[in-house]
Image: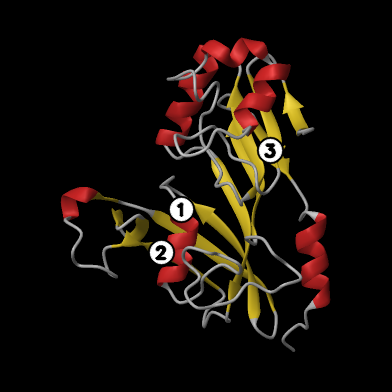
Amino acid sequence: MNIEVIFENEDLVVANKPSGLLTHPTLKSKESALSDILLSKYPEIKDVGEGEDRPGIVHRLDRDTSGLIVIARTQASYKKLKELFKKREIEKKYYALVWGIPAKSKGKIEKQIGAYKGKRITVEEYSQIKPSKTRYAYTSWELLEKYNKFSLLSVSPKTGRTHQIRVHLSSIGHPIVCDKIYGGKKKCPLDLGRLFLHAYFLGIPADKSTMLEFELRLPKDLDNFLNSVDKNK
């Protein structure tokens, strides 16, 4: 598989991950992942990071999520990027098509997230989760467009919890379209067939005065689906 490289320098690579591709191999799957493909092009990342199964991987995107992801090419760059993520100085934005229309044009979600029976859920949903087993999560969102059944949002996760955007949006009654885990009883439209979540913007501080900024358009399959549905007038 050919991976589109958006930017590269001696420290990092910014790539456009397609939907359906794992960020890195897992214990449950031995299939090829983004890290395997990039390792063949950038062999120096083999010894970068915290384990050989995640060469250069600083953060991850879910298998079905597409869009921008940054990979470190040196250990020094890896440590710097990890610190920037920890301090929440790296800006990420996602396009998310959700079911229903929010009552407000923008909002924020601050809900603890924990694991329960194989899923990530918020404490407000299941009181069985012990507070010590949860982690703080913060997501902001803005309404971009209304459709008859859906709404297109720009979503910014300020923290980086597993499935954070999907869990948070589901918790406020607006699950992402085609989310097989957190979409409830909502059926995925046949002419879409994939999770409508795309990481379209990435802002990385290069130094105190310079910000590296990258932005993508919607992938053709997601854009075609939006053009096929009626807007809410």
Callout 1, which amino acid? His
Q: Quadrant of the C terminus?
A: bottom right
Eye-nearest disc, 2 or 1: 1
Secondary structure of the residue carrying numbered label 2? strand
What residue is shown with label 3? 213
Q: Using the image, determine if residue 116 lies above or below residue 8.
A: below
**Residue visible at 57% across and 75% down?**
105
Instruction: Decide if residue 20 is on the left or right side of residue 140.
Output: right
Indicate the quadrant where residue 99 lies: bottom right
What residue is shown with label 1? 163
Callout 3, which amino acid? Glu
- The spot of residue 83 in percent (x, y) is 43, 27
Q: Using the image, determine if residue 129 lies above or below residue 125.
A: above
**Whether residue 206 is visible:** no
Secondary structure of the residue carrying numbered label 3? strand
Q: Earlier in the sequence, mark 3 or mark 1?
A: 1
Residue count near mark 3 (Cα–Cα under 10 Å), binned few <14, some 14–19, many ≥20: some
Indicate the quadrant where residue 68 lies: top right
Callout 2, which amino acid? Ile
Eye-nearest disc, 2 or 3: 2
Q: CA distance from mark 3 to mark 1?
A: 24 Å
Q: Earlier in the sequence, mark 2 or mark 1?
A: 2
What residue is shown with label 2? 109
Instruction: Decide if residue 116 is on the left or right side of residue 231.
Output: left
**Whether residue 122 is visible:** yes
Residue count near mark 2 (Cα–Cα under 10 Å), binned few <14, some 14–19, many ≥20: some
- The spot of residue 9 in percent (x, y) is 71, 18
Instruction: Decide if residue 159 is on the left or right side of residue 225.
Output: left
Q: CA distance from mark 2 to mark 3?
A: 25 Å
Secondary structure of the residue carrying numbered label 1? loop
**Residue visible at 44% across and 54% down?**
164
